[in-house]
């Protein structure tokens, strides 16, 4: 996870929180969070990077729409990141 950009981490977290979302569903969630438009040229190459790293699976819903799902490795990476963050943030959240 340490070698991902913040945007890639956000993509991973959003995908983990949705049930096999397609790219536009992920895009909508991030646009709500970032309060700005996310261009396809930024979204899809970064999703492909996460697939290449084995953190997401990419499947076909139909001939035009891909769906994404977090892998077991992706879940482990999120859990490890959460544990790492907790050691630094536990005092401010209690």
Image (spheres, rainbow, N blue to C red):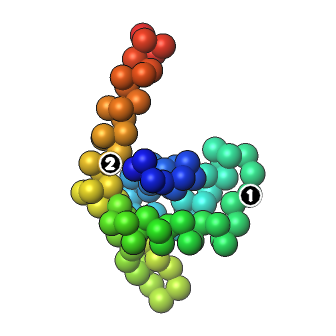
- Say what secondary structure mark 2 lies in: helix
Q: Give the vertical position of 47 relative to 93 (above or below).
A: below
Count the numbered circles shown.
2
Q: Residue at x 43, y 64 (%)?
A: 50
Q: Residues within 10 Å of mark 1 (few under 14, many from 20)?
A: few
The image quadrant of residue 57 is bottom left
Specify whether residue 43 is in view: yes
Q: Residue at x 44, y 21 (%)?
A: 89
Q: CA distance from mark 1 to mark 2?
A: 27 Å
Q: Give the vertical position of 5 relative to 21 (above or below).
A: above
Location of mark 2 (residue): 77
Query: From this viewpoint, which residue is outermost toward the front?
Result: 3
- Say what secondary structure mark 1 lies in: loop
Specify whether residue 14 is in view: no
Q: Position of residue 19 (x, y in %)?
A: 38, 58
Q: Residue at x 50, y 79 (%)?
A: 65
Please tell me which residue lies in front, 60 or 10: 10
On the rendered structure, is 85 left or right of 6?
Answer: left
Q: Give the vertical position of 83 relative to 71 (above or below).
A: above
Image quarter hosting the C terminus: top left
Location of mark 1 (residue): 37
**Residue contact between numbered discs 1 and 2, judged by CB atoms under 8 Å:** no
On the rendered structure, is 25 left or right of 52?
Answer: right
Q: Residue at x 40, y 50 (%)?
A: 1
Q: Position of residue 70 (x, y in %)?
A: 34, 59
Looking at marks 1 and 2 on the same chain, the residue that comes earlier in the sequence is marked by 1
Q: Position of residue 37 (x, y in %)?
A: 74, 58
Please tell me which residue lies in front, 32 or 43: 43
């Amino acid at each position: 996870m340490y070698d991902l950009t913040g945007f890639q981490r956000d993509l991973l977290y959003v995908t983990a929180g949705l049930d096999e979302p397609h790219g536009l569903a992920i895009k909508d969630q991030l646009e709500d969070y970032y309060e700005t438009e996310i261009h396809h040229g930024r979204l899809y190459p970064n999703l492909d990077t996460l697939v290449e790293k084995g953190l997401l699976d990419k499947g076909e819903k139909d001939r035009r729409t891909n769906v994404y799902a977090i892998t077991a490795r992706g879940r482990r990476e999120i859990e490890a990141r959460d544990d790492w963050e907790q050691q630094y943030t536990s005092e401010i959240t209690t």
